[in-house]
Image: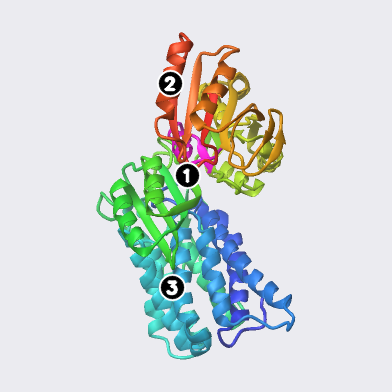
Amino acid sequence: MAHAPQTFLDALAVRTWCGLALAALGRAREEIDAINVYPVADGDTGTNLYLTVESAATAVEAVFAGYEAGADGGAPSLADAVRAMAHGALIGARGNSGTILAQLLRGMAQVLAADGGAAHSGGEGLRLALRRAADSARLAVAHPVEGTVLSVASAAADAADGAEGDCVTVARAAHRGACEALAATPAQLAVLARAGVVDAGGRGLVAVLAALVETFAGEAPALLTTATDGAHARVDALPDSLAGPAESCADGADGEDGGPAFEVIYLLEAEDTAVARLRRRLDALGDSLVVVGGDGLWNVHVHVDDAGAAVEAGVEAGRPYRIRITHFGAGDAHARVGERPLRERAQRAVVAVVPGEGLAGLYTEAGATAVLARPGEPPASGELVEAVRRAHAREVVLLPNDAELRHTAAAAAEQARAEGIRVALIPTRSAVQGIAALAVHEPGRRFDEDVVSMTSAAGATRHAEVVVAERQSWTMAGICQAGDILGLVDGDVAVIGADVTETAVSVLNRMLSAGGELVTLVLGDDAPEGIAEHLEARVREAYLAVDTVVYRGGRQGALLLIGVE
């Protein structure tokens, strides 16, 4: 649909571009998902790009709303808008391509926001911004690979460098250069050539650049389209000058033969020097490493076999949060292209909310998709729905692991069911109940039988936590003061003490008085040294034939979680 063109870069042009790019990716999302074969054939690149741009567009709208609500009713500057766009993309980036797109937008913002933006509102400013974007994105990737979105971004910048004129001239040149580079991607990556597709991330960037052309020209240029051919999607409507045979490259391209089992993404508050060390450590742990951002805030993306180690590396570097860990699934995401249909769904998956980084690693190693809930930052229903989608299964067992998330999880389950996914919600009230449920999970069983077994295991697990009282209050065990140690059993305060270990022993005795066969201890980062050994010794001495297992939960809010089965 045609609209009034923007003749130069200003805040309104940025707002328009974000809206048009979001609409373009919304239309192309399923198509891009379908051709997603590199670096992992998990069929979510289009969705990840859409969510990344959605976050950017939301941030820009918030800036406009803030100015409109002000007393003077003014408008944001170009610098205000592009900084908001870049920040929104950074905090909302999803997946490998979404993280790279966030860095592309950040690179553009660094140029366009300089000197308040006034000096770079024309074609020359756009040329410089596109060049900075391509260069900074390439630097953010640990091992750049040609035939990807990086190649498309570089070609767009090269084409823009040779264009003389206003913003629409530069944008059209960049779009054309991106189209040509996109058409060449199958000849650069053998995995694309065998599948008969162009790079999915590059295809998404072409859509974003087409929206940039539409912003300045008033109408969109012709876009590439793809059509489905059996299980694969192929380029079907390239301009004649861009079409050509997708010749296979030499065998052995990255991403062909297996790969890490987990995708780990998190935001990180850290200093530049710490991030440099983090890059080296994560590079040794896995592949597809992309670290973007700056000024103390970073978005980290990596594929690894040891998800816990990747998160621990972030903890050592600074403060990681909004941690998302996805288990690709054995024989699924990294299978050779052609051995199975693209976007093949698993039959069953488990999605669980967990309170700490250590438990996130534990759950993902057990095959679950973990959603991290930091203290004071519970996930919204939309985040749970997204996790269910990422699990990419026909049947999903959802473990909220928190009584206060019951309604949120129920809303997410209802939405996922509306999308055709069979979801069973097990009302787990603690992560230790979730561990018990996951321990008896059998994907080979009938769905109903598996859910009943997991529900029974969770229900048979009493749960407790040891926490520090934040304020004076009335409890079931009497009045507590701020700083007191509280022992909660099944959600109610049962013990008030002054010492963490003594309180934990008292709680454990209460729980085992009714019997039990297995004690699960999950230690928070602030748990005192030696508490696990003390509690294990207590169980051995006082309760025969009761086993104990200990996990490190990380920054989980509670000093200690206890489960008794």
Q: Residue at x 58, y 41 (%)?
A: 483
Label 3 belongs to which residue?
Answer: 107
Spatial CA span between label 2 and label 1: 31 Å
Label 1 belongs to which residue?
Answer: 325
For label 3, the SS is helix
Spatial CA span between label 1 and label 3: 27 Å
Q: Residue at x 61, y 40 (%)?
A: 469
Label 2 belongs to which residue?
Answer: 536
| Callout 3 crowding tier (Cα within 10 Å): few <14, some 14–19, many ≥20 | many
Give the residues in magenta: 353-371
Magenta stretch holds residue 476: no
Q: Residue at x 35, y 58 (%)?
A: 274
The amino acid type found where label 3 is placed reads: Gly
Locate residue 19 relative to residue 234 in the image: left or right: right
Q: Position of residue 243 (x, y in %)?
A: 41, 67
Magenta stretch holds residue 370: yes
Q: Position of residue 163 (x, y in %)?
A: 42, 86
Q: How is the image coloured?
A: rainbow
| Callout 2 crowding tier (Cα within 10 Å): few <14, some 14–19, many ≥20 | some
**Can residue 254 be seen at all in this image of the molecule?**
no
Tell me: residue 118, above or below residue 437: below
